[in-house]
Image: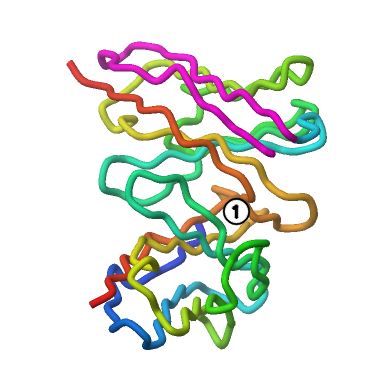
Amino acid sequence: EVQLVESGGAGVQPGGSLRLSCAASGFTFDEYAMHWVRQAPGKGLEWISFINSDGTDTYYADSVDGRFTISRDNSQNFLFLHMQNLRPGDTALYFCAKVSSGYDPAFDYWGQGTLVTVSS
Amino acid sequence: SYVLTQPPSVSVAPGQTARLTCEGDNIRSKTVHWYQQKPGQAPVGVVIDDSDRPSGIPERFSGSKSGSAATLIISRVEAGDEADYYCQMWDVTGAPPVVFGGGTKLTVL
């Protein structure tokens, strides 16, 4: 059974930093690209970052580019999101998500999310 | 950046058919996925690759595309279908490469 379990969310002041983790199991982790998607309270889904299967290619939404860094540890089956210079607008539930294989793949598995609150 | 537009809300009576639209430029050339999200839960794919159903999704859920819109069709709507629904596609030459629609709240009357 595929499982994605996020952790690391917390309350933090503006300008602060956090590292989110996503523990993956039930599939061959190093064969799949992974993503982070966030959802602000009462709002829709916002894609924020992608990393390819071997970690050599990453991509970010403009809203987080230069402040967030996605990485992965294929030896331990973990996905990470390093978040710096956090802003109140970064307050959201952060999901890690796996995509299926193929061209234009769907998100086939999601974690339950970890909550980040940025407030003074 | 590419924009997918969904109506904020759709209401339907139980047993009727709900049609949720997702509009975007040249959407017929894109592959569209649909996700259902119930309160406090993660999204779940209900239609992928325009019109396929993931394992475990009832046949009542289907998808189509026509003109500039993709449509999620939910037949014989049940109370348990009440949720937010998001369309999603890839725009590999754009920024961002992954685009979600704003979501539609389906209310079952």
Left or right of A30? Residue B107 is left
The one of B109 and A71 positioned closer to us in this rendering = B109
Amino acid type at image mark 1: Gly
Q: In this view, does A46 lie above or below B3?
A: above
> Which residue is drawn at the image coordinates 46% and 22% (left, top)?
A67
Q: Position of residue B65 (x, y in %)?
A: 58, 82
Q: In which quarter of the image is residue A115?
A: top left
Give the residue at the far left of this rendering.
Answer: A120
Residue occupied by mark 1: B94
Q: Where is residue A103 in the image (x, y as percent from the top left)?
A: 77, 57
Q: What stretch is highlighted in magenta?
A: A1-26
The one of B98 and A116 positioned closer to us in this rendering = A116
> Which residue is drawn at the image coordinates 67% and 68% (left, top)?
B49
In magenta stretch: residue A19: yes
Q: What element carries label 1?
A: loop
Q: Is residue B2 above or below residue A87?
A: below
In the rendered image, which quarter contains the C terminus of chain A?
Answer: top left
Crowd rating for badge 1 (residues with CA inside 10 Å; few <14, some 14–19, many 20+): few
